[in-house]
Amino acid sequence: MALLTILHYPDKRLRKIAKRVAVVDDRIHKLVADMAQTMYEAPGVGLAATQVDVHERVVVIDVSEEKNDLRVLINPEILASSDDQNTYEEGCLSVPGVYDEVDRPARVRVRALDLAGQPYEFDADGLLAVCVQHEIDHLNGKVFVQHLSTLKQTRLKARLRKEQRELERV
Ligand code: NI
């Protein structure tokens, strides 16, 4: 296993749309193992392949307290979303130090492939529903801050640019 480098917003590579995985082979197994290690090490509750500059539809999630419930979602799809929404304060390993409220459907039904390449479905609510939608957004080239108001996004980019300039001066 290996730790992977996580891209940071507003890196343009985070905007790429990931391709579907054609075959769940050893290469994908290694990617999943590396992504899981990177997520646990960070630490985070979810990671999409896009965030480690691999533009294929692979997601790892573990929202458990004990960090012993790894979920692997290959080619994940939202089959249905509830009409009622939840507001959750989201963060992202690609946007360190930034947390803000995002509204999303409270419950979703999800279909994905497992590590054996077999399709499975599950219903998600609470943090898991937030996480699944957040990670699928990544595969579609979208970071959670893009759900925020234009004003907030402009301020955030200005702040990140300023921080970057300060880093370059050191
Ligand atoms: Ni994220």
Image (tube, rainbow, N blue to C red):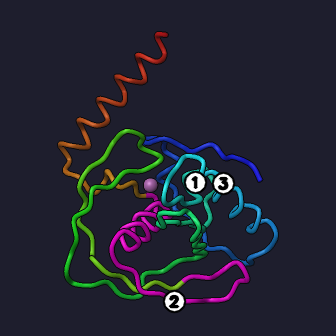
Tell me if residue 57 can be seen.
no
- Please tell me whether mark 2 sits on a helix, a strand or a loop: strand
User: Whole-percent x and y of residue 122?
Assistant: 47, 87
Q: In which quarter of the image is residue 67?
A: bottom right
Q: How many labels does the image show?
A: 3
- Give whichever of discs 1 and 2 has the lower sequence position: 1
User: Whole-percent x and y of residue 28?
Assistant: 73, 67
User: Which residue is located at x 56 percent, y 82 percent?
Assistant: 112
- Nearer the observer: mark 1 or 2; the answer is 1
- Farthest residue toward the front? 66
Q: Which quadrant of the render holds ligand 1? A: bottom left
* Highlighted range, magenta: 112-141
User: Which residue is located at x 29 percent, y 30 percent?
Assistant: 158
How busy is the neighbourhood of tag 1: few (under 14 within 10 Å), some, or many (20 plus)?
many
How busy is the neighbourhood of tag 2: few (under 14 within 10 Å), some, or many (20 plus)?
some
Residue at mark 1? 39
Mark sitting on residue 37: 3
Q: In this view, does 157 lie above or below 111?
A: above
Amino acid on which the number 1 mark rests in the picture: Met
Are dots 1 and 3 in contact, CB under 8 Å?
yes
State the separation of the CA atoms marked 1 and 3.
5 Å
User: Whole-percent x and y of residue 100?
Assistant: 26, 50
- Please tell me whether mark 1 sits on a helix, a strand or a loop: helix
Ligand 1 within 8 A of label 3's CB?
A: no
Residue at mark 2? 121
User: Which residue is located at x 21 percent, y 43 percent?
Assistant: 152
State the separation of the CA atoms marked 3 and 2.
24 Å
Q: Is residue 159 above or below residue 110?
A: above
Q: Which of 150 and 34 is in front in this view?
A: 34
Amino acid on which the number 3 mark rests in the picture: Gln
Q: Is residue 41 above or below residue 104?
A: above
- Give whichever of discs 3 and 2 has the lower sequence position: 3
